[in-house]
Amino acid sequence: MIKKSKLSRRALLRGGGALLALPYLEAMMPSSALALPTPQVTPRLGIFYFGMGMNVRQFFPSDFGPSFTTSRILRPLEEHRGDFSVLSGTYMEHGGGHKGTYCFTTGVPREEKQGVSFDQVAAEAIGQGTRFPSLQMSIKRGTGFGGTDLATLAWNRQGVPLPAQNDPSVLFDRLFRAPTAEQKARQATQLQQRQSVLDLVREDAGVLQKKLGQADRRQLDQYFNSVRELEKQLQRQVQWSEKAKPNPDLDGIGDYSTPMAPDKDGEFSYETYSKLMYDLIALAFQTDSTRVITYVVRTELRGGSYPEWGLSKDYHSLTHHGNDPQNLEELAKADTIYMRHWAHFLRRLRSIREGDGTLLDRALLGFSSGMGIGHSRDLLPTVLSGGKDLGIRHQGHLALPKNTPLANLWRTMMDRLGVESSPPLHDSTGIIKELVDA
Amino acid sequence: MFRHSLLLFVCLALVGPSASSSLAQDAVAPPDSFEAVIQPFLRQHCVGCHGAKKQQADLRLDALTADFDATDQAAIWIEVMDNLNLGEMPPAERPRPDAAAHRQVVQWIAEQLRAARKRAVASGGRVLMRRLNRTEFSNTLRDLLEMEFLPGEDPAELLPPDATFDGFDKVGSALMLDPSLLENYYEAARRVAERAIVTGPPPFKTHRIRFQMEDMAKPGSGFSYVCGHDGTECGEQDVRLLLGNTRTARGLLYPGTDQIIPVNGMYTIRVRASADPGDRDAPVRMFVERENGREGRLMEVEVTASRDDPQVYSVTLPLDALHEARGVYMKVGIVEGTKLHVGMKQYNDLEQAVKEASTAGDHAAALRLQARMRSEGWVGRNRPAEVLLDPSSLPKLFIDWIEIEGPLYPQWPPRSHEILFGKGEVPRKDAAYAREIFSRFLPRAYRRPATKAEVERIVGLVQRELERGASFEDAIRLGVTYTLTSSSFLYLAEPNSAPQPRTLNDYELASRLSYFLWSSMPDERLFELAASGRLSDAAVLTREVGRMLDDPKSQAMVEGFAAQWLRTEEFLEFTPDRKIYRDFDPALREHMAGETLAFFEEILRRDLSVMNFLDSDFVTVNEPLAKYYGLDGVEGEAFRRVELPDDSPRGGLLGQAGIHLRGSDGVRTKPVNRGVYVREVLFNDPPDPPPPNVGEVEPNIEGERLTVRQRLLQHQQIEACASCHRGIDAYGLALENFDVTGTWRTHQNGEDFRGANTPPIDASGKLPNGQTFENFEQFKAQLLKQQDRFRRGLVEKLFVYALGRPATTQDRGTVEQVVAEMADHGDTLRAAILALTSNEAFQTK
């Protein structure tokens, strides 16, 4: 059948210029914006990216509603029924064909100058009181900007990608490792030295700036902005260095003392690694070290499968499945493993009590991909988990109208966080009403 | 109605939307074609539903302008192009546009989009100020402070990989800076300053410590029990191994520590050993490993010394301290020793007999058999007592001693310290001396003379640190950290606030040259020539470019330019299906990437014609690849030039296995992807991007066994697809003789083809210029007829790499000039580089 990709309002809404030029319709505004039910609850946000899509033929259940029949890939999530919703019909205008990581959180296609990602907008609103306003995690270190296998989902106000960390031990140290007295003294000196250096480099760059033409000035603006941001961070660090780092209970949680990442030497087991990463998010949320996390679980193009799984090809090769049953079978096998880890993550969050709820009820966790199957930009494997105390009403398997912008889910989540986004998020046409408490 | 999944834009999406365009391929229609061609087309086919009266889907095309720099307009054009390409518009019930007009419109839009994107990146035809990329940052520190970075200590490892444009990591608009990156730069600078300056003697003096291997038999060694087991015999002078390895326990600990390697550094390991190959033809090989070491084998050598004349075998290498790992010891062992303990027939027979007796309930017999096993030495599960064996025919390794020397320092204090403080004692530890230090250091760090204010800014910083009670060394360290974090160091700045371009000064020229050819800062000689104002002299410049290319630092051109141009990283993206290509060793992929880089290096170093990229009578291979290609007489893993027999298809880039591995998905070849590679890499002429949601070459339907070529041609019948594919597919189908693993084939293999069903490969085709070819050889001959097109593509790639921006139509003169000069001078890379560096575009800002 022909897939109609009609010229739509959505098409016109791409690009910042167009966005501002078009009249904004009040009618499209969600009715429930800023109407958080329980303002005392501390909200958390997690955005997760599974590159290269999934075998959606075995991902989406065949029927709908809260008591849907589970699918092969979703079976590991059975124990969490009622705590998540599978969304059929999501779509990204600029996704598909390994381009989807770029527009995932910004709505801006890979070819264009990027804008701020919505997790950063959320971090500005809800993350300022924590030690880390946001955390970027990924299977791949850095940003990977320019390449297809982008490593991060977070972009600052300048549209500059924020690099992600892929080693749980590094993240753990950053979050929880208490400095020794010696380290503390050294840190105090270093903070003071850094302040001196930042003062001076700004002064020095100011001299250069006066001699530059316009285009070069814009380049140097990034430098100035970075210096400013670092100074802010410095102040934050000075403030936070007075406070002790949290010392979470690590009972039943893996070992964060050794470096472990796919690009590092030493033993690597994805099973162990994946749990360390997910558990770390739970720990970070639990200790309120951060409230906003992005995590590229799988990048586009590279990696995605591990020798211990015994697949005949790497994940990317499998996505070129060519309808070969063996490829589809192996894809489903890999996807199921990822969902088993996701189930572990939800279980961990649910085991942590907070107030009269659980951490899972206070976290909005959305995952999807930049493509569906066969490099398509529709049929995205999209799931929203958690957030019951934030006014989410789960629907089991929910059928959205065909080609519903993925940004509608993001907008729903932002709405539940109580973060107003103006102009409206990307190409979103509204919130997903079914997911929201009436 | 046709099925979209059958559209055969195979994996174009993988290559990504084309970014640059070739200057060779002008816009398909003249600039005024918007009014003459495009608007009439829109009026005829689109405006009826998307016009002033009706705006279906909220879209009006009658007011659309040709301003592709406006994102809103460009977005609509993309939508128009996609829908035309997909054949969804005009809708089925409306008249079809004429195929030629359809093609013209689609190509025009694609061309305009490309040009607009290039304009956006090209910064108005001016070189954009940019930061150093991570390679340049690391290389510059190496040269500025003459520091060697051990693995794991390279400051570049603190930096995330750089952004790229068209695959190159030198493009100004892509090299952005964000707070965390600046923080990384700061941290890297701080660590470099920390290491560059030392106080007092080295924290760990160079030590030499030896372990007599036979000492392992001593009761206190903790593992004397190994003697006599597992083929290990502890003699008076040495230890003999038949298999496995032996170890040093605590015998090699650095004095005063519980570590063999007390600190990251360079170490020499020596082993005095001898061997007896027994009845085996091959020499005995010995390895040295570190327990818990993550680095793999530290040494693996052939031991040819006989037992009456043992020799010392040694290696010098960087080693990390493994403080977290306890029980670190060295292992010395024999490679492929004699298996003594598994699958020995007598043992298996006895085991079996015991089992049978037990099963039969005859426990007495079972006990008897077990007693017999013990008495015959079949003890410890399945290990025979060695006394029962005659080892005279088995290969043996004798280890006398092992020694470690280190950490090694080329000098102390290190060069970096001398560069900053000068040789000998520091005369005064005060602000005045700090002024001397930074008056020397800043001009080199900033790659230009430093102003008095710039020096005083650091002196002030140092002064304040001293007043706060910091040591002189620490204060200077902070000054160095500041220098390496400042914009004058991090950015390649050529200030020009005037609207008119200006000629670079000699210092700026020196940096352009050094970052182009060395990916690092200028050396002393370039600075001297810049200071005396002679570098811009044409003859001097020519001589200097020649000198720089001959300098080993120009290896940066191979690792930077060649790797990015030829995309050797992508050779590693797919692994051939292990079930279909059982014999393929994945380790070969690294060698394949190595071959392509070595080939470039050969052409660069020996001033060969770049036409060798199209076809050559030699390859550059190492032993594993030579074997793969069926070439004899190549030993070792180093790449070298090997002449090809006349009938070999391996000449030129397109004969190299890695290119074809890259252009396959592990199961099938991807001719479209290969064709795009040929057009983008060899001709810098990327085809138009595919419509969205296009699929792949479909797998064979049950019962059908079409080749990839047949399936591709079948679907070229679809007019909407054909227009683009005609310009791509022939370039890829010509390469069908190379299978998924880059192996030459004359018949189909892989996928569903085996046994009697292996149709012969058809690699014939017709190029877009109308020339036809019957096979791969003729195809290469046709490519060789397009020398100017190839030269132009190559020069455009060099242009991006050298200037950090793509060549636009305004640069056409520059490109043509460089092409002409290269052609006049033997088509060498040297000639192209000389022509480019002496061009106005290279020398102005």
Image (spheres, grey):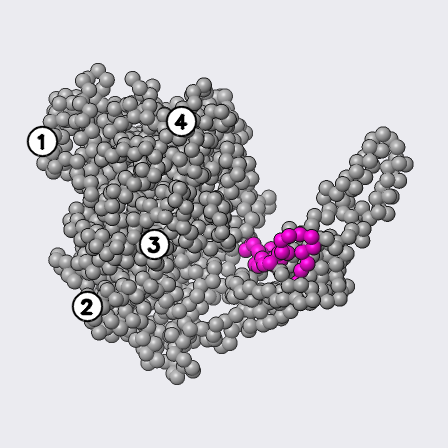
Residue at x 23%, y 65% (from the top left corner): B541
Q: Nearer the viewer, residue A3 or B544?
A: B544
Q: Report the residue marked by disc 1.
A: B36
Q: Residue B603 has which mark?
A: 3
Q: Residues within 10 Å of mark 4 (few under 14, many from 20)?
A: many
Mark in front: 1 vs 4: 4
The secondary element bearing badge 1 is classed as helix
Q: Residues within 10 Å of mark 3 (few under 14, many from 20)?
A: some
Q: Report the residue marked by disc 4.
A: B707
What is the x, y in percent for residue B417? 42, 74
Q: Earlier in the sequence, mark 4 or mark 3?
A: 3
Please, which chain is the residue tagged with disc 4 on?
Answer: B
Q: Nearer the viewer, residue A230 or B651?
A: B651
Badge count:
4
Please, which chain is the residue tagged with disc 1 on?
Answer: B
**Based on the displayed image, in which of its 4 quarters is residue B187 positioned?**
bottom left
Mark in front: 2 vs 1: 2
Measure the C-alpha gap from mark 1 to mark 3. 48 Å
Please, which chain is the residue tagged with disc 2 on?
Answer: B
* Residue A139 is at least partly visible in this image: no
**Based on the displayed image, in which of its 4 quarters is residue B725 positioned?**
top left
Measure the C-alpha gap from mark 2 to mark 4. 60 Å
Left or right: where A348 falls relative to B656: right
Q: Amino acid at mark 4?
A: Thr
**Based on the displayed image, in which of its 4 quarters is residue B296 positioned?**
bottom right
Residue at x 9%, y 32% (from the top left corner): B35
The secondary element bearing badge 2 is classed as loop
Q: Earlier in the sequence, mark 3 or mark 2?
A: 2
